[in-house]
């Protein structure tokens, strides 16, 4: 598999990571090496195999729909880059 | 006093219980060692002596009131991926350079309930992505045995701190070998338990279906004592196993007669340094002398572990790390045009190169049209690998082999070539993909390089007590784990 410079720019946009034009080439070369390693698994015939995500095949539990957490807004917002009056501040999104 | 810097957890506990030493005295001793040796080792990111001493005082007070918690007053240091309320928690990243954890992870809370005192937060590869500790924003940890070599990763600080006697034990996390490989590189015992027995709540997520917490210590007996404190059902973790508490020390004293050790031919082929193969063979002879038998087994799909892992881990990481947006916590760029640009610049500045690479890989494999070819195919390979092990366990109780194909390497030896770095985890990754428990214990030295060799034990699900029994019996018969670096 080969990745084009446009592929890198598209993925970087989806991932919300700024990649400058002079970084694209290096990122492209490193990712291609990694995908070469990954593509080793494509030859395996896995028809009919059930994919696995948990070794003991457990299913997710349900809990009662009740309040279990207390409100700690100030504490959590103390890590925010910018917050005021209980809100997280971000650049204007809606004109 | 009958304890010293390298006293094990088990012996430290006895010294505390018999009042030969107090929690405060122990905390002071290790803090002063850590403060002076950290300048050369860089094992700790954060030390907060005042907080540690007050924790130690609280544990001494518990004792004076008659409390008999199992590890009352024993010091521990935590990988900086565990949230502890009020402690800075960086995950080795610029992104979280100033992040103060607002709550405490279940594992740390369990250990505090058992009486353990936090000595500080340990250096690690950024977001646990690395095998050499060279990706940490706070600089690499040095291997205490040879400062020109890496301590392994991603739990490099966890391994170096115990090996150097800055703490009797530490916690790590293991997503693809991040406990076991550094344990080998620093001549320690390290255990990654069965997926689901240690809560992931409050551990900064890397790859949620693979991440597991586990202990580092000098001995298997210590790992058993530590796991007793760490493990347990937690309703805060949706994948936590709801099952009764176990005593992982219960089988330590059992003789090994009748233990069947499976030797996968895939773990002894080319690619393993000959000095490592030799040390592992010698260790297997010890196991045979102790009454175990060995049988060759085959794990034909295990060779797809590394490719499957480099789909699953980056895919889950790209999702988990999307929370770092520069809006709610973490680094925010100083200048930006609009909100999208704020995300992009904050993430570009806050994450290091390896973390960005993995997010990009993960984003690609999960993007429209590629899911079946990558994440789904990797999930199917996980099943095939798990079935290989299931078949092996028809004829053996545990599987053994080398922990890594080569020992501690020089700084810079692999840092420019991610694929070369990834292949160092070739033997450890399969246990994360399947969720099985696995551990590494010291078993000698590679005569060609002088570097330590680890024996890798992989066990069936929930079979930690048997693995710890095997390693403990080996350690009663050998001295490798008793070596300490001159510092």
Image (cartoon, rainbow, N blue to C red):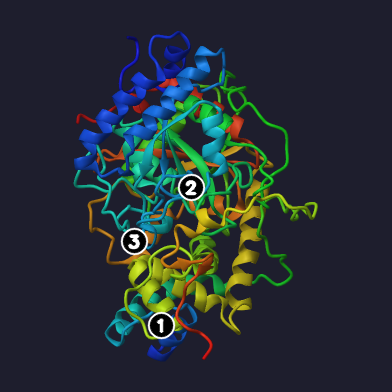
Point out the tag, 1 or 2, that comes first from the N-terminus.
2
Asked which secondary structure carries label 2, the reply is loop
Where, by quadrant of the figure, is residue A37 drawn? bottom left
Q: Residue B214 in the image: x percent, y percent? A: 51, 40
Q: Is residue B84 above or below residue B204?
A: above
The residue carrying pointer 1 sits among few (fewer than 14), some (14 to 19) or many (20 or more) residues within 10 Å by Cα, namely some
Residue at the disc numbered 2: B83
Residue A70 shown left or right of residue B343 in the figure: right
Residue shown at 31%/45% (left/top)? B151
Cα–Cα span, label 3 and label 1 = 19 Å
- Using the image as rendered, state which of residue B461 and residue B228 is in the foreground: B228
Q: Are discs 2 and 3 located on one and the same chain?
A: yes
Contact, CB < 8 Å: mark 1 with mark 2? no
Residue at the disc numbered 1: B341
- Using the image as rendered, state which of residue B349 and residue B411 is in the foreground: B349
Asked which secondary structure carries label 3, the reply is helix
Quarter of the C terminus of chain B within the rendering:
top left
Q: Tag on residue B457?
A: none
Q: Using the image, name the chain to which the residue with label 1 belongs.
A: B
């Amino acid at each position: 598999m080969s990745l084009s410079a446009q592929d890198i720019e598209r993925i970087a946009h989806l991932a919300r990571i700024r990649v400058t034009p002079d970084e694209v080439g290096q990122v492209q070369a490193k990712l291609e090496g990694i995908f070469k390693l990954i593509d080793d698994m494509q030859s395996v015939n896995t028809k009919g195999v059930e994919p696995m995500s948990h070794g003991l095949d457990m299913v997710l539990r349900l809990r009662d729909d009740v309040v279990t957490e207390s409100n700690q807004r100030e504490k959590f917002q103390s890590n925010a880059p910018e917050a005021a009056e209980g809100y997280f501040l971000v650049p204007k999104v809606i004109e | 006093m009958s304890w010293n810097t390298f006293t094990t957890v088990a012996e430290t506990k006895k010294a505390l219980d018999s009042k030969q030493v107090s929690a405060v005295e122990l905390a002071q001793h290790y803090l002063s060692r850590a403060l002076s040796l950290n300048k050369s080792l860089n094992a700790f990111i954060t030390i907060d002596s005042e907080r540690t001493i007050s924790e130690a005082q609280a544990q001494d007070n518990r004792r004076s009131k008659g409390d008999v918690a199992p590890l009352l007053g024993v010091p521990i240091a935590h990988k900086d991926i565990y949230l502890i309320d009020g402690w800075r928690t960086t995950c080795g990243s610029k992104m979280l350079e100033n992040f103060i954890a607002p709550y405490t992870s279940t594992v740390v809370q369990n250990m505090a309930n058992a009486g353990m005192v936090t000595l500080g937060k340990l250096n690690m590869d950024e977001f646990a992505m690395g095998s050499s500790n060279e990706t940490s924003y706070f600089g690499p940890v040095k291997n205490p045995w040879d400062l020109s070599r890496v301590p392994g990763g991603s739990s490099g600080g966890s391994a170096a701190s115990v090996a150097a006697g800055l703490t009797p034990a530490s916690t790590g996390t293991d997503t693809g070998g991040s406990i076991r490989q550094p344990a080998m590189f620093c001549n320690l015992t390290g255990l990654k338990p069965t997926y689901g027995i240690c809560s992931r709540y409050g551990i900064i997520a890397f790859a949620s279906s693979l991440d597991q917490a586990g202990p580092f210590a000098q001995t298997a007996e210590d790992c058993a004592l530590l796991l007793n404190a760490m493990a347990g059902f937690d309703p805060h973790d949706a994948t936590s196993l709801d099952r009764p508490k176990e005593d992982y020390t219960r089988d330590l004293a059992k003789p090994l007669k009748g233990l069947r050790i499976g030797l996968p031919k895939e773990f002894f082929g080319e690619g393993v340094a000959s000095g490592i193969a030799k040390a592992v063979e010698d260790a297997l002879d010890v196991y045979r002398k102790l009454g175990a038998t060995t049988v060759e087994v085959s794990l034909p799909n295990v060779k797809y572990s590394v490719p499957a892992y480099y789909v699953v881990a980056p895919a889950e990481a790209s999702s988990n790390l999307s929370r770092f947006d520069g809006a709610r916590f973490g680094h925010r760029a100083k200048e930006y045009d609009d909100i999208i640009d704020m995300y992009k610049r904050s993430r570009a500045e806050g994450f290091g190169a390896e973390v960005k690479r993995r997010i990009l890989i993960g984003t690609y494999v999960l993007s429209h049209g590629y899911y079946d070819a990558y994440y789904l195919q990797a999930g199917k390979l996980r099943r095939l690998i798990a079935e290989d092990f299931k078949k092996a366990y028809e004829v053996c109780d545990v599987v053994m082999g080398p922990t890594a194909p080569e020992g501690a390497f020089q700084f810079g030896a692999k840092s420019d070539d991610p694929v070369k770095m990834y292949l160092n985890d070739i033997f450890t990754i399969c246990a994360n993909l399947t969720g099985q428990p696995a551990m590494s214990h010291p078993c000698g030295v590679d005569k060609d390089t002088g570097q330590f060799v680890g024996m890798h034990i992989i066990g069936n699900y929930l079979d930690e007590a048997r693995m710890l029994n095997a390693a403990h019996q080996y350690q009663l018969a050998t001295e490798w784990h008793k070596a300490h670096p001159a510092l």
